[in-house]
């Protein structure tokens, strides 16, 4: 039963202190990419938000500790909703909420769900 659920991986992880040389190197690389990438882009170009279709950017924002908000942006030909995501620098949550709210008010895209199969 243990192999079936991959418990051996959790037991091996529990036996460590949680961070080794590979993890330290990955964290340093992430910090460098954040500083020289996203943060530099946002500050140099004085951007309020990064705007992307869908929510695929959310994990990337989360890894860097950056806020993001997704709101409805439209519906496909089957009526399935899709969204738009606004991401920003740390501390930009009030601005992102303002932008997302403005988008929602300008587009009036959102419809209450019908809960039909």
Image: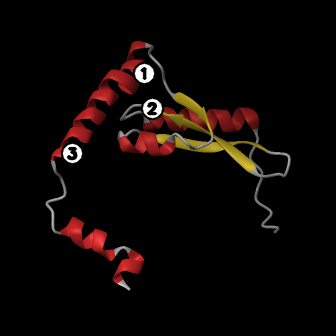
Q: Are marks 2 and 1 in contact (CB under 8 Å)?
A: yes
Taking depth in this image into account, of 114 and 52 the one nearest to the observer is 52
Label at residue 8: none
Q: Earlier in the sequence, mark 2 or mark 3?
A: 3
**Location of residue 110 with respect to 101 vertically, above or below:** below
Of the two numbered discs 2 and 3 in the rendering, the one whose residue sits closer to the viewer = 3
Q: Residue at x 29, y 69 (%)?
A: 9
Around disc 1, counting alpha carbons within 10 Å, would you say few (fewer than 14), some (14 to 19), or many (20 or more)?
Answer: some
The quadrant the N terminus occupies is bottom left
Locate residue 77, reporting x and y percent: 85, 46
Q: Which residue is mark 3?
A: 22
Residue on which the image places disc 2: 88
Residue at label 1? 42
Single out the residue that lies furthest toward the bottom: 1
Residue 23 x %, y %: 22, 46
Q: In the image, is 93 to the left or to the right of 86?
A: left
Mark 2–mark 1 Cα distance, whole angstroms, equals 8 Å
């Amino acid at each position: 039963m243990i192999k079936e659920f991959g418990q051996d991986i959790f037991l091996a992880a529990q036996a460590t202190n949680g961070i080794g040389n590979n993890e330290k190197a990955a964290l340093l690389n992430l910090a460098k990419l954040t500083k020289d990438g996203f943060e530099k882009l946002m500050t140099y170009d004085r951007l309020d938000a990064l705007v992307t279709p869908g929510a695929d950017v959310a994990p990337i924002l989360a890894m860097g500790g950056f806020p993001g908000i997704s709101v409805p942006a439209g519906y496909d030909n089957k009526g399935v909703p899709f969204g738009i995501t606004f991401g920003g620098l740390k501390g930009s949550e009030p601005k992102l909420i303002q932008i997302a709210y403005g988008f929602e008010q300008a587009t009036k895209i959102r419809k209450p769900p019908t809960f039909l199969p």
